[in-house]
Amino acid sequence: MEHAPILVHRISPTGGRRVVIRIRGVDTVLGMAFSDADLIEFLRRIDIPDPDELVLGGFVHGS
């Protein structure tokens, strides 16, 4: 399987971050993430294994 870079851009003036996946040199916008939960959902939709762990790195909210 080819590894596709996932780019999370800096914060836009609206407060979100554009999330893009690059496959074979073509960028596809997954959406605008306004929270970790948004980013996790985008990654889940493209079948990234354990997107919670990838984004949060073992951090549990509220601990």
Image (cartoon, rainbow, N blue to C red):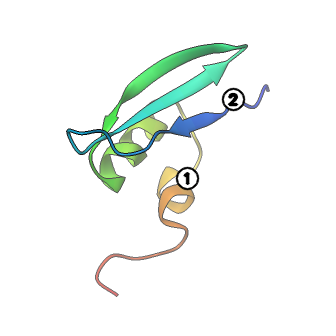
Q: In the figure, is residue 26 to the left or right of 36?
A: right
Mark closest to the chain's N terminus, 2 or 1? 2
18, 56: nearer the viewer: 18
Tell me the quarter of the image containing the C terminus.
bottom left
Location of residue 25 with respect to 19 vertically, above or below: above
Residue 4: x %, y % from top left: 69, 29
Residue 41: x %, y % from top left: 37, 41
Q: In the figure, is residue 62 to the left or right of 27?
A: left
Location of residue 35 with respect to 48 vertically, above or below: below
Most extreme residue toward the left is 14
Looking at the rendering, which quadrant does residue 32 occupy? top left
Q: Are marks 2 and 1 in contact (CB under 8 Å)?
A: no
Residue pointed to by mark 1: 50
SS class, disc 1: loop
Amino acid, disc 1 = Asp
Location of residue 52 with respect to 25 vertically, above or below: below
Q: Nearer the viewer, mark 2 or mark 1?
A: 2
Q: Residues within 10 Å of mark 2 (few under 14, many from 20)?
A: few
Could you tell me which residue is drawn at 53 percent across and 73 percent down?
Answer: 58
Q: CA distance from mark 2 to mark 1?
A: 16 Å
Could you tell me which residue is drawn at 28 percent across and 42 percent down?
Answer: 16
Q: In the figure, is residue 36 to the left or right of 24?
A: left
Could you tell me which residue is drawn at 70 percent across and 14 percent down?
Answer: 25
Label annotation for residue 4: 2
